[in-house]
Amino acid sequence: NVISNHMPTAELQALDAAHHMHPFTDNAELAKTGARIITGADGVTLTDSEGHKILDAMSGLWCVNIGYGRKELADAAARQMMELPYYNTFFQTTHVPAIALSAKLAELAPRDLNHVFYAGSGSEANDTNIRLVRHYWAIKGQPEKNIIISRKNAYHGSTLGGGSLGGMSGMQTQGVPVIPGIHHIDQPDWWSEGGDMTPEAFGLERAKQLEAAILDLGVDRVAAFIAEPVQGAGGVIVPPSTYWPEIQRICDEHGILLIADEVICGFGRTGHWFGSEYYGIRPHIMTIAKGLSSGYAPIGGSIVCDEIAETVANGGDFNHGYTYSGHPVACAVALANLRILQEEKIIESVHDTIAPYLAQKWQALADHPLVGEAKIVGMMGSIAMTPHKESQAKFAADAGTVGMICRTRCFANGLVMRHVGDRMIIAPPLVISKAEIDTLIERATKALDETY
Ligand code: PLP
């Protein structure tokens, strides 16, 4: 009995419910309805087991920047599997895919971020970052400079390290403590928390919390600050314009390492190669994953500046690594993905044409009676829903409910949007066309109408 796409949906769902534990899911609840089975995809469109076509405005999980169905990546994987499917990069060995990808990333990354440490995912890469920055300061004779400051509602992954760095309370429950030496400050979410302040004043106030925390904890104890240029999983929280310049000033003045988590913002999502470039941020380390391979193969990593890489290189063995650090097939797939992004000038097209078009359409959703605020940076946008447009009231405890209803209506109308509390968010493939953007907006509007 071969299990295949040709089996009836209900049978596949029953097998799925019997044997597959879904991440971030109430599995008992899901078993009642059955998971939707995605059987294929092309461009920006998914197909499910019942033949429905669904516009994927989330690029899977913010991954598929070049869109689905690119044969070049399948060919790159097949070639590499035949030539060298696996070899480790520990113990004095390396291989051409890891060399070539590292050189390419050094060329693409800003400033002197010239060195790559590979992981299998964004979470693992952030675990690497915790070790890297603490080890760096220890080598420099300051082992007590080991606290990492992060932000509430940030998402940095689901491992013990990544979940601790992140600021989502749900990630730090169910028996999982925050590992020692992590401190959280407030997020720059003006819609939810700005009160009567202007966005600019609020952005400054939130940035200054970093300085207050550094002074409170002690400059000699704070190793680094980590943040996503735009908080993605937290709800596409676009920071006020005053926020990043002030954060940069504070990190510079106090000698605090800056880690930009570019797992979502990297590889064209903002219309630049990296979100750091969009905001003029000068990080010492960037976390990468997702768009690095457009999700075609699991790979993540840290791109590290000269000074940190050289200090760590001269500090003896770095006792850290993963079996799949620099996996040759994943590296080959990532290289093919970067080649497509470059040769087809996809990021230029996003910057010059597609993102401005999407922004114009997306921001028009702010006129909908259910929408309080519509924000967008490049190809990532959010709308915050309100129960009362005039007063810009917030949905309280049932925020998740309105989001869930809207998401379900999107699905029924052939659109994947995600909900985070009372926000609906999008991050479509960068190759989406103007006509597909029109379809996205039409379906989103219909879903909002049906939720209202
Ligand atoms: N960092 C950010 C900003 C992310 O959005 C994510 C995943 O969504 C991660 C890290 C974790 O990456 P992964 O799920 O590949 O472990």
Image (spheres, rainbow, N blue to C red):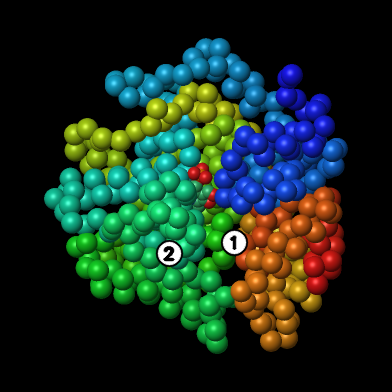
Q: Horizontally, is 123 left or right of 437 in the view?
A: left
Q: Which residue is mark 1?
A: 236
Quadrant location of the N terminus in the rendered image: top right
Asked if one can make out residue 339 in the rendered structure from this viewpoint, the answer is: no
Q: Residues within 10 Å of mark 1 (few under 14, many from 20)?
A: many
Q: Estimate the spatial distance between the alpha carbons at disc 2 and disc 1, rounded to whole Å.
A: 14 Å
Q: Which mark is residue 151?
A: 2
Q: Is residue 423 above or below residue 198?
A: above
**Farthest residue toward the left?**
141
- Residue sitting nearer the eye, 212 or 355: 212
Confirm or reject: label 1 Cβ below 8 Å from ligand 1.
Answer: no
Quadrant, the C terminus = bottom right
**At numbered mark 2, what does the secondary structure look like: helix, strand or loop?**
strand
* Along the viewing direction, whichever of 170 and 235 lies nearer the viewer: 170
Identity of the residue drawn at 48% across and 81% down: 201
Q: Amino acid at mark 1?
A: Val
The image's mark for residue 384 is none
